[in-house]
Image: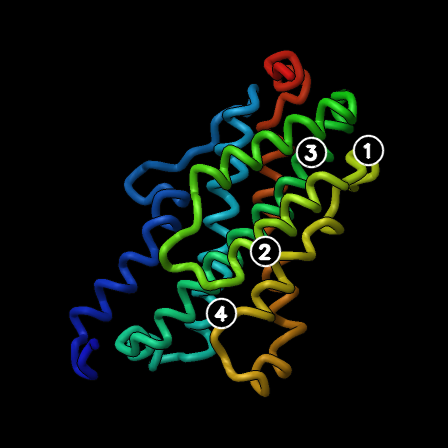
């Protein structure tokens, strides 16, 4: 059990939680905005941005809510356990939303709907297989992953709009899973949902700019 005054341990935990955000943001010149011209590049984009949105949305909200007491929370093992579980639910929800949006872009770019469906299902399975069931995840992770699979299997790709309409799972996941008392979340819910949707705007702009739908279609093998 972490002791109440183990500030070094708390700092270490915070630093670990921010690794994905640092990589995505390119601290030290590592920003990644490469063209997306094949299925593997698209899978990398979707997975990395899902991780980024999941962590920055969750930790940003908790930091705002806790204020100056934010570092103290990481000295509590119970809180850290809940936060880690929430992180993985946010990742699944973000993966779901961005996969739907990406598939919609491919369909509007001229890729046949059945090919979009086959490719997005395959890319999702590869990502989930590589991730497995994280040790930090809770008992609901597998069931949640199943819901993501079902959504991708049933999405009518040609009907996905180029807007925030398909980004509804990630805001809902933050409201449901963030480790904060229910009375406070009721007060924050509208702001929380809008904040997550706002965080997706840059990701959507990047994917629109970087995605070559015709090249991805040519590179895809059923």
Quadrant in the rendering for residue 12: bottom left
The image shows residue 145 at horizontal and vertical percentages of: 57, 50
Query: Label 2's element?
Result: helix
Front: mark 2 or 4: 2
Query: Label 4's element?
Result: helix
**Mark 1, residues whose alpha carbon is within 10 Å: few (<14), some, or many (≥20)?**
some
Front: mark 1 or 4: 1
The image shows residue 109 at horizontal and vertical percentages of: 74, 24
Tag 3 near tag 1, CB within 8 Å: no
Task: Identify the mark nearer the N-term, 1 or 2.
Answer: 2
Residue hosting label 4? 61
Rendering colour mode: rainbow
Q: Nearer the viewer, residue 68 or 171?
A: 171
Task: Identify the mark nearer the N-term, 3 or 2.
Answer: 3
What is the distance, in whole Å, between disc 3 and disc 1 at their CAs?
A: 9 Å
Task: Identify the mark nearer the N-term, 3 or 4.
Answer: 4
Residue hosting label 1? 158
Residue at x 51%, y 71% (from the top left corner):
178
Residue hosting label 3? 103
Residue hosting label 2? 144
């Amino acid at each position: 059990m972490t002791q109440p005054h183990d500030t070094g341990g708390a700092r270490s935990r915070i630093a670990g939680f921010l690794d994905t955000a640092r990589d995505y943001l390119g601290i030290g010149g590592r920003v990644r905005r490469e063209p997306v011209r094949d299925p593997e590049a698209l899978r990398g984009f979707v997975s990395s941005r899902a991780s980024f949105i999941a962590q920055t949305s969750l930790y940003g909200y908790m930091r705002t809510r806790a204020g100056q007491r934010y570092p103290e929370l990481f000295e509590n093992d119970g809180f850290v356990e809940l936060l880690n579980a929430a992180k993985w639910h946010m990742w699944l929800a973000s993966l779901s939303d961005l996969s739907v949006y990406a598939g919609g872009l491919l369909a509007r770019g001229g890729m046949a709907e059945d090919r979009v469906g086959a490719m997005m299902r395959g890319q999702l399975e590869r990502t989930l297989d590589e991730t497995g069931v994280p040790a930090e995840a809770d008992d609901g992770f597998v069931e949640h992953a199943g819901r993501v699979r079902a959504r991708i299997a049933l999405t009518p790709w040609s009907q996905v709009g180029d807007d925030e309409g398909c980004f509804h799972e990630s805001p809902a996941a933050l409201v449901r899973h963030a480790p904060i008392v229910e009375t406070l979340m009721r007060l924050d819910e509208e702001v929380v949902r809008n904040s997550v949707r706002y965080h997706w705007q840059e990701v959507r702009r990047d994917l629109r700019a970087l995605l070559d739908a015709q090249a991805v279609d040519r590179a895809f093998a059923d």
